[in-house]
Image (cartoon, grey):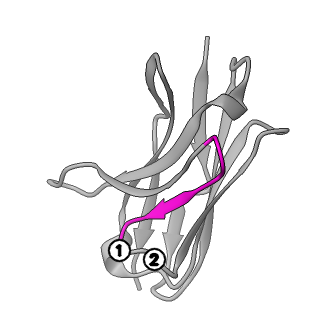
Amino acid sequence: QVQLVESGGGLVQPGGSLTLSCAASGFTFFSAYDVSWYRQAPAQERELVASMARADGTTNYADSVKGRFYISRDDAKNSVHLQMNNLKYEDTAVYYCKAERSLGPIWGQGTQVTVSS
């Protein structure tokens, strides 16, 4: 059974940093999956934050996080990371990891990030 488990969320002050991790298990070839991070704030729709293609590692970021967030993956360790710098109040949300290939997406359960002074 394939599974994604996020970790690293928490409470941080504005301007601070956090690194989220997503551990994948049960995958035969994790490197064959496109990976991404999404977030969902209260009463808002889930939105794409960052993605990384499996083929060439091409990354894509939401305009709101460009220059502050960085996605990376370690296929040897079946993991994906999201480095978040200069965090803002509006970054507060539940962050989800997603892995996807032809059979459809696999989601993690999410980790809460709260930016507050």
- Quarter of the figure with the C terminus: bottom left
- Quarter of the figure with the N terminus: top right
Q: Quadrant of residue 65?
A: bottom left
- Badge 2 marks a residue whose secondary structure is loop
Say left or right for 40 vs 78: left
Near-viewer residue (6 or 77): 77
Q: Say which amino acid is labelled 2.
A: Lys
Q: Which mark is residue 66?
A: 2
Asked whether disc 2 touches disc 1, contact meaning CB atoms under 8 Å apart, the reply is yes
Instruction: Report crowding for label 2: few under 14, some 14 to 19, many 20 or more residues within 10 A (C-alpha).
Output: few
Q: Say which amino acid is labelled 1.
A: Asp
Q: Dot 1 corresponds to which residue?
A: 63
- Badge 1 marks a residue whose secondary structure is loop
Residue at horizontal 71 percent and vertical 34 percent from the top:
31
x%, y% of residue 110?
A: 46, 43
State which region is magenta: 54-62
x%, y% of residue 112?
A: 44, 54
Say left or right for 96 vs 56: left
